[in-house]
Image (spheres, grey):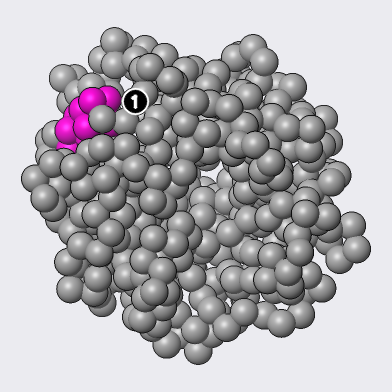
Amino acid sequence: MAEMLPSLMVPTSSWLRRSVHRRWLDHQGLRLLDFSKPSRMKLGFGPLDEEGMLTPGAPPDTILTARMTHVYAIAAMRGVPGCLPLAEHGVAALRGGLKDKLHGGWFTASPETLKTIQEKRKENYLHAFVALAASSAHVAGVAGASALLKDAAHIWETHFWSEEEGVFRESFAADWSDEENYRGANSNMHSVEACMALADVLDAPIWRIRALRSAERFIHHFARENGYAVPEHFDRNWKRLDDFNHDRPTDDLRPFGMTPGHFVEWSHLLLKLEAALLRQDGHAPFWLLTDAIGLFNTGMKAGWSRNGTGGLLYTVDFQLEPVVQNKPHWCQAEALTAAAALLKRTGQAPYETWYRKIWDFIDLHMIDRKKGGWIQELDADNHQSEVVYPGKADLYHAWQATLNPLLPLSPSFATAISELDG
């Protein structure tokens, strides 16, 4: 069934329709896939340094393992050699040594490397990526993926989904006790992505409804009332925690303040959710489009080139003044994905302009043509930095940015690839 949105409104002059640009995207995606292949470890995958080498002594990382599994499963479906064995390796690790055999679920690293009670907590952020990886691997026909998908969906639904609140809970102790007094926009944002994948792969519309409920609370309620700037941190009673991590402004997952990169990431997720709901039965709330536009506009106004050097910065305070002016690569990737999604959805010229401008910035400042991969972070003056993100551990954001413009807004990655090539 074709996507029920006016993608044909994209002008013929758009980069999205240019064969050279589409080949360029494919080429960049293949370069990223090759660069990250050495991240394979005996158990799962680990972080790469600036040179593309495994960080000495680093344990396997479960979030990276899930992300690599997701990416290499889809790349295998596209016919890229060497990717299926990596996806199989990731599935085996998630079913094996990275899983908690006693209580179920996953830790952020192999259990024997975790020393403190805090390190042994089970996080929604991670479990959303395990569910995403399992769904993509299942579609790709990776050995063991169907069992992993069944397990991951059950654990995620049973322990993390809050039917009463319509959001995902944040974290628990190893035995699923001691629920954290926190509700986070970041983990729920990635949960929306994983929910849409599960809905497609399992043919289970309930997961789309969960995605919609989470988006409605965090975006249509909290962000819309805040001028489409997304508050990130709440307690379990939904009190905003505006001072949360005030002493840790460069935290990689829960920094102080607000993150314009998340504003734009939510933007394209809302458009994908709208497309998925329209594809399902022809109906979707109109606010998904309205809010997506508002999020993109606020994110780019708050975060883009605040000091005149281009790029989207990391964090702002609640007056939208810069806090951390370093520019993570993932912020740029999500901004261009949002611009492309809005261009497909509306056909409006300003989104084409943004799409080209963001790619120009990435091409000139972040694509590392000497050592490979993307530079993960720049400082305010576009010099390489490692304040928030050391090395070159992340493949997921950059690689998806090279594939997103080539695909319709719905269905999700793995299902879209299977339908396009089927």
The x, y position of residue 275, in whole percent, is 41, 46
Report if residue 191 lies within the magenta region.
Answer: no
Q: Which residue occupies the extreme front position in the image?
A: 56
Q: Which residue occupies the extreme right position in the image?
A: 102
Q: How many marks?
A: 1
The x, y position of residue 341, in whole percent, is 31, 40
In percent of the image, x 85 and y 44: which residue is there? Answer: 96
Residue nearest the observer in this picture, 85 or 54 = 54
SS category of the residue bearing label 1: loop
In percent of the image, x 46 and y 57: which residue is there? Answer: 252
Report if residue 363 lies within the magenta region.
Answer: yes
Residue nearest the observer in this picture, 281 or 86 = 86
Image position of 280 (left or right of 119): left
Residue nearest the observer in this picture, 268 or 298 = 298
CA neighbours of label 1 inside 10 A, class few (<14), some (14 to 19), many (20+)? some
Answer above or below: position of 385 versus 277: above
Image position of 67 (left or right of 101): left
Q: Which residue occupies the extreme left position in the image?
A: 308
Answer above or below: position of 33 versus 3: above
User: Which quadrant holds the C terminus?
Assistant: top right
In percent of the image, x 44 and y 21: which residue is there? Answer: 372
State which quadrant residue 349 falls in. top left
Q: Main secondary structure of the magenta part?
A: helix
The residue indicated by pointer 1 is 367
Answer above or below: position of 235 versus 416: below
Residue 205 visible to an observer of this rendering: no
Answer above or below: position of 30 versus 309: above
The x, y position of residue 133, in whole percent, is 65, 42
In percent of the image, x 36 and y 23: which residue is there? Answer: 368
The x, y position of residue 144, in whole percent, is 83, 36
Tell me the magenta residue range.
354-364
